[in-house]
Image (cartoon, rainbow, N blue to C red):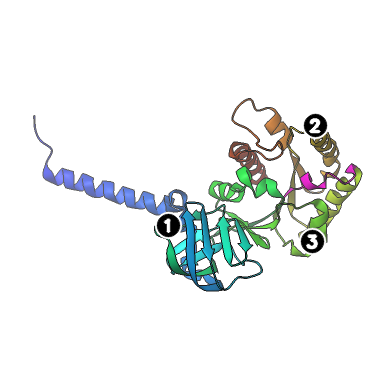
């Protein structure tokens, strides 16, 4: 049996290496999330000086500092100008700060001890041109829903997220964990202009009479269209709840929501999407769902946005 010539092996090896390099350059942002940040555009926010690292894990760090702020600015902690921790929450108690719900962007410090610490703004790359503003409460911020913007971005790099808040990955949005229709209208000045609005609210309006909640949704619709007359607005209805009182409330809101579905407004039926599932979709508190539920919501939402461009 004839052996393969050395020259042929070398050419094959060069072609393979070339293919791998090209493939990596095209897919590095997808496979390695740290490539999605603008490392040359980091902005310093709050300097804690020298701190003591009390505890550190893959999704958590606690420090002791002599410069205790009233609240923490930003959502990225930088230690020794080397270790970047993107956090979801920061809890301050006396001279200790706990940063939770996050991840180490590059690598994790191995040892406890002293370190320099500051918060920074680590902007995410958004090379697209379709501006999207997500107006939400905990559903698209917490637990299974905190990855929604990241998943949407991975599906379509033409999306540019805008808003006055920033999630754990660095994507802007509008809202807060306990946000409501009423709060959103009170803070309407924080809502930016956008080509697409995604609204998921209503969970924390349960103590408000249903007609008033729907009236609030309608006022919000008019507010958004004044800001961006050509925008498309997607309103996500409320999912099923294991709590009987909340389930009745959710159904009442969902029944009335189609009344605002005109003039560039479309209802995304999250309730039906969840209700029709047999396996995989779960809830721990009877209100918010696991990642699988919100992944399916992202797929549905992306198809709608992509189809209406």
Horizontal side of residue 33 vs 128, given as left or right: left
Check the image and report above or below for 173 versus 208.
below
Upstream in the sequence, badge 1 or badge 3?
1
Q: Is residue 188 magenta?
A: no
Q: Which residue is mark 3?
A: 188
Whichever of labels 2 and 1 marks the residue nearer the N terminus, that label is 1
Work out which quarter of the rendered image holds the N terminus and state it: top left
Residue 224 or residue 167, whichever sits in front: 167
Residue 280 location, quadrant = top right
Tag in front: 1 or 3: 1
Label 2 neighbour load within 10 Å: few <14, some 14-19, many 20+: few
Q: CA distance from mark 3 to mark 2?
A: 32 Å
- Residue tagged by mark 2? 244
Q: Does dot 2 land on a helix, a strand or a loop?
A: helix
Which residue lies most toward the top here?
Answer: 278
The numbered mark at residue 167 is none
Give whichever of 26, 39 is nearer the camera.
39
Looking at marks 3 and 2 on the same chain, the residue that comes earlier in the sequence is marked by 3
Residue 182 in which image quadrant: bottom right
Label 3: how many Cα within 10 Å (few below 14, some 14–19, many 20+) = some
Q: In percent of the image, x 77 and y 33: which residue is there?
A: 243
Q: Quadrant of residue 290?
A: top right
Whether 165 is drawn above or below 233: the answer is: below
Question: Seen in the image, is 149 located left or right of residue 192?
Answer: left
Residue found at the far left of this picture: 1
Q: Which residues are magenta?
A: 199-210
Residue 25 coordinates in the image, percent (x, y): 39, 54
In the displayed structure image, the side of residue 24 where residue 266 appears, left or right = right
> Badge 1, how many Cα within 10 Å: few under 14, some, many 20+?
some
User: Of residues 121 and 197, which is closer to you in this image?
Assistant: 121
């Amino acid at each position: 049996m004839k052996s393969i010539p050395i020259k042929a092996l070398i050419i094959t090896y060069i072609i393979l290496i070339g293919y791998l390099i090209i493939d990596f350059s095209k897919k590095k942002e997808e496979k390695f999330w740290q490539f999605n940040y603008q490392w040359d555009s980091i902005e310093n926010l709050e300097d804690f000086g020298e701190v003591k690292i009390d505890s550190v894990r893959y999704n958590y760090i606690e420090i002791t500092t002599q410069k205790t702020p009233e609240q923490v600015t930003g959502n990225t902690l930088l230690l020794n100008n080397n270790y970047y921790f993107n956090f979801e929450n920061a809890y301050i108690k006396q001279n200790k700060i706990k940063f939770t719900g996050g991840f180490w962007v590059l690598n994790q410090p191995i040892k406890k001890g002293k370190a320099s610490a500051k918060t920074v703004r680590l902007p995410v790359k958004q090379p697209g041109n379709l501006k999207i503003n997500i107006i939400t409460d905990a559903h698209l911020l917490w637990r299974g829903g905190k990855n929604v913007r990241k998943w949407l971005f991975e599906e379509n790099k033409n999306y540019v997220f805008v808003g006055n808040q920033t999630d754990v990955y660095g994507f802007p949005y509008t809202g807060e964990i306990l946000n409501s229709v009423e709060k959103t209208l009170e803070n309407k000045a924080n809502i930016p202009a956008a080509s697409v609005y995604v609204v998921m609210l209503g969970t924390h309006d349960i103590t408000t009479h249903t007609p008033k909640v729907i009236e609030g949704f309608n006022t919000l619709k008019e507010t958004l269209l004044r800001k961006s007359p050509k925008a498309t607005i997607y309103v996500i209805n409320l999912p099923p709840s294991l709590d009987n009182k909340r389930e009745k409330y959710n159904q009442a809101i969902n029944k009335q929501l189609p009344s605002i579905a005109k003039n560039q407004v479309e209802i995304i039926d999250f309730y039906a999407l969840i209700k029709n599932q047999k396996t995989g979709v779960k809830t721990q508190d009877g209100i918010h769902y696991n990642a699988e539920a919100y992944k399916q919501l992202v797929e549905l939402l992306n198809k709608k946005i992509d189809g209406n461009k």
